[in-house]
Image (cartoon, coloured by chain):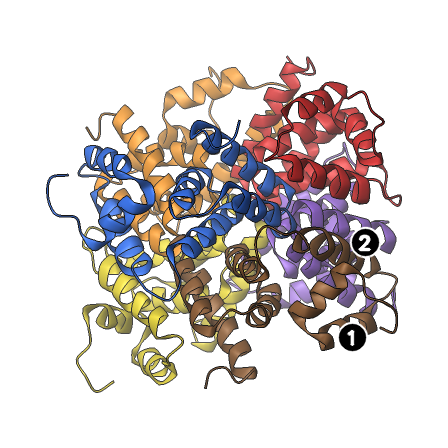
Chain colours: A red, B purple, C yellow, D orange, E brown, F blue
Amino acid sequence: MDGKLTVGEGIMGELMGQDYLERRAANRNAFNDALQDYSAEVCFGTVWARPGIDRKIRSIINVAMLVALNRPNQLRHHLEGALNNGCTVDELKEILLQSAVYCGLPAASDGFGVAEEVFRKLGKID
Amino acid sequence: MDGKLTVGEGIMGELMGQDYLERRAANRNAFNDALQDYSAEVCFGTVWARPGIDRKIRSIINVAMLVALNRPNQLRHHLEGALNNGCTVDELKEILLQSAVYCGLPAASDGFGVAEEVFRKLGKID
Amino acid sequence: MDGKLTVGEGIMGELMGQDYLERRAANRNAFNDALQDYSAEVCFGTVWARPGIDRKIRSIINVAMLVALNRPNQLRHHLEGALNNGCTVDELKEILLQSAVYCGLPAASDGFGVAEEVFRKLGKID
Amino acid sequence: MDGKLTVGEGIMGELMGQDYLERRAANRNAFNDALQDYSAEVCFGTVWARPGIDRKIRSIINVAMLVALNRPNQLRHHLEGALNNGCTVDELKEILLQSAVYCGLPAASDGFGVAEEVFRKLGKID
Amino acid sequence: MDGKLTVGEGIMGELMGQDYLERRAANRNAFNDALQDYSAEVCFGTVWARPGIDRKIRSIINVAMLVALNRPNQLRHHLEGALNNGCTVDELKEILLQSAVYCGLPAASDGFGVAEEVFRKLGKID
Amino acid sequence: MDGKLTVGEGIMGELMGQDYLERRAANRNAFNDALQDYSAEVCFGTVWARPGIDRKIRSIINVAMLVALNRPNQLRHHLEGALNNGCTVDELKEILLQSAVYCGLPAASDGFGVAEEVFRKLGKID
């Protein structure tokens, strides 16, 4: 991580934290390099880098989609990212509750479970 | 529609428009009444009625979830509702583009297709 | 349809009606033959033919799964099949309403839409 | 848990057992309270409380939907609930096998895996 | 379409045909331009352009994923693209039949329905 | 495992290895027997046994579908099976990367995670 960051890596670092970028670089290998590049260049460099909606809204959209898509690993990261982008725990609670109506109670219940774990680890809830 | 609106019906009317409420009342029958009540009381009366995040954010969350869930019928309504709640066409374009990254290109492509139809009908795009 | 029915075709005919079997035979071709055989032999001949739960329960399970899976074409057939297997319109209404809680309101709403169409065509609701 | 139970909590207790209600009350906090209320009031108080189909059928529907929705955490609870509502292990085996046809073998295989775990823990299978 | 094609557009044209590219250019507007660019640059320019597996295999992968994802609009295009990339009708029949096992019979049945329509229109089946 | 293998068990053994067949036989009980038979007879005996596409292509299709379906338990087995059927690690990397475009980055990311685990355990990557 001694080189210059690309635009995508910069946004990823703001969202996920510097530690995340370093773990990611340490885990890079000849198998996952293409996925890492895709994530940095397409996801963060091309889409997250666009103006038009702010980063907090982008985080909210992601939390909503990841609950619907049933992807707890990414939800975990993006709940933490949402806090970094200015969402409060109370706002995230509302988003997850709204998912109960549209994605169903099991989706919301799994989402609350992941969020309690993340927020407790970060000292945001007791 | 001559009686007083419940809290849920009031919010639904602001989101979807008065015409929507009237068509809905006209279509009510002994089969779909339970679904209509669930929608008015649970979805709008209990969840949408909550403070904590504003209506525009609730609309954004819904668009994101409905693209992920592959539900074009509801997406159609909630894209129109999102405009009523203050989203711009350009903001909705960004949400749909972000879904390409997380939900996949086919989901985004279907979402753009629905949105073009809705926005053209409403005179929002050429 | 002049030959003897297999076990699977017999069950399919009871569920879907004789007309369905005849349309199906008329549509058989060198491309869809493998799917038709799979449906008759695996789905109906192997699984539906099993004792342990009755046909009405099998229909209820299918309606629940097809709403969750977002497959309106098959839901249409299996709602009609559920009536043939002894489900009432009121029971199917309850199943669809329960899907609002677990699969989300959009799934239930699409399910009610399909059911209204099927039940109206069959003269079961006004 | 010293107060009076609501209708929804009563049904939840019959389905999931008294222990479940107590663990649930012990885990309640300012973050998950809204989800707990939604579950008690909407899911159990509004939908499970309805007449029209009996509790055993409601459990069967849930098992079918949860396998389709890929939600093992809730499937675990509702398989146990299904036994409490009068389903036998053999009936649940049939439901899960039927999911192989409609939801695909991976869904059924995951469902059987969850069920083996639950039923073994409860001493229902060896 | 008078300019030079990008790498992505070139691959898209080989897959989908020249007509597709022209209809696409004619439909481009200020709303869908970002999606079109994403499709040309990310999907075709970055991923399809990679060596490592040939185009026919990429088409096979797409058909499999699109059936699983329940996206008939894109399945339609990619079934036609698969023929352009060297798949035969008989190979596609096998892929769709295999989806019955893993994605469930409703997914396979919808997939066969889409394929019959596409292949009949192209004169590949009667 | 001293008896003669059925056609389906033979194909399953080639795909998954002899150890897999033995663990499977050891785990067979009165609850999961029907699922085991379904897997051996329908999945392997009826579909995998068909000519028309070779085993390597069948493995590729499965990896694509299992990523899309969000079923990591089966993906694990079928990634190993894909290697046994002649896929290389580099080809599987391409399939998983392509899923980022069509199934979304979270699906691809989970898929790469499962694959790294499987390939490392088998000594295929560092």
- Real-space Cα separation, disc 1 to disc 2, in angstroms: 23 Å
Would you say A95 lies left or right of F96 here?
Answer: right
User: Which residue is at a point 78% across and 24% down the rendered structure image?
Assistant: A84
User: Which residue is at a point 60% across and 69% down the rendered structure image?
Assistant: E81
Q: In which quarter of the image is residue F13?
A: top left
Secondary structure state at the residue bearing disc 1: helix
Q: In which quarter of the image is residue D15?
A: top left
Q: Which chain letter goes with mark 1? A: E
- Any mark on residue E22, and which? 1
In the rendered view, tell whether residue C76 sits above or below residue D124.
below
Which one is in front, C100 or F93?
A: F93
Q: Mark 2 points at which residue?
A: B93
- Tell me residue F48's x, y (percent): 33, 57
Secondary structure state at the residue bearing disc 2: helix
User: Which residue is at a point 39% across and 69% down the rendered structure image?
Assistant: C80
In the rendered view, tell whether residue A104 sits above or below residue E75.
above
Does any portion of residue F34 appear in the rendered image? yes
Would you say D104 lies left or right of B19 here?
Answer: left
Please, what is the three-letter code of the amino acid marked with disc 2?
Lys
- Tell me residue C15's x, y (percent): 30, 69
